[in-house]
Amino acid sequence: MTEKIIGSKRIAKRFANLKAEGRAGLVTFITAGDPNLETSSAILNQLPEAGADIIELGMPFSDPMADGPAIQASSQRALDNGASMIKTLDMVREFRHSDSDTPIILMGYFNPIYIYGVERFVADAAAAGVDGFIIVDLPPEEAEMRAPVEQAGLSFIYLTAPTTDDQRLPTVVEHASGFVYYVSVTGITGTKSASTQDIENALERLRRHTDLPIAVGFGIKTPEQAAAIGQHAEAVVVGSAFVNKLAENLNPDGSAQDSCVEAVLELVRDISGGLTA
């Protein structure tokens, strides 16, 4: 009988496969329910075939303070069209009917999880097929989710940044699992990019504190940028570029044009191509 691969094991297996292939992985971000559940689900279900190695699925929230205008707008569109935590988990559950290999990370803020109930949420997420969490406003000192996540065999991915010094890094990575997300610039998502040399130096310093794979995100928009960063990181995270592409293919009333799904997937293929060339 084949062992069921879940949570941290699924993430570890994906990074092991990427290492064997000799390339960095592509982590794609979309917001669950943006611009509506049908379109969002269609994109999600086709992301792996388009080149996504790991998927970050944003949990819509009314006050996404760490996100730039593009992802803030995507979250609001989703909420305006009835997105909820339950529907987000339903999207993952549907995805798992056809894909048991691609890791899915839920990314968002603690408030909706607190309202849902932490232990119940983690249990429901694990049952749906979620592999880990990035909760951007929950620093390592706040341990509310740690025990339930570890007990469920899932990963808790922490963020590090250029401002995370050597004194702070051990605290950040001590309880991290799955991978470490290096935010390559200070500020909000989708606004600027760091130089490749700065990223290379930062990753060298970060690796002195952790053996986990490192994914680099914030400001990566092109295949060329992804390829350059992929020479140094185990994975590259792209989010605002896909969200912007989706927004470009909406009608004035906010509904999805016929081109919407394919436009996003085509950009995923382009950026994935930069990592596999």
Image (cartoon, rainbow, N blue to C red):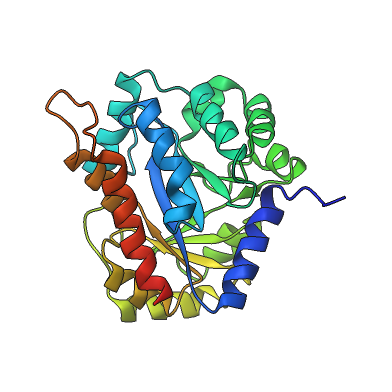
Instruction: Give the quarter of the figure containing the C terminus.
Output: bottom left
Residue 154 in the image: x percent, y percent? 68, 46
Q: Outermost residue toward the right?
A: 1
In front of the other: 232 or 269: 269
Residue 264 in the image: x percent, y percent? 30, 48
Quarter of the image for residue 58 reads: top left
Residue 219 in the image: x percent, y percent? 28, 60
Q: Outermost residue toward the front?
A: 258
Quarter of the image for residue 64 reads: top left
On screen, 61 above or below 240? Answer: above
Quarter of the image for residue 130 reads: top right
On screen, 137 above or below 199? Answer: above
Any part of residue 160 in sight:
yes
The residue lying at 55 percent from left, 38 percent from top is 95
Q: Is residue 201 left or right of residue 188?
A: right
Q: Is residue 133 left or right of residue 66?
A: right
The residue lying at 22 percent from left, 60 percent from top is 192
The residue lying at 53 percent from left, 65 percent from top is 169
Q: Outermost residue toward the left?
A: 252
On screen, 186 above or below 273? Answer: above
Q: Is residue 10 left or right of residue 196?
A: right
Residue 222 in the image: x percent, y percent? 26, 65
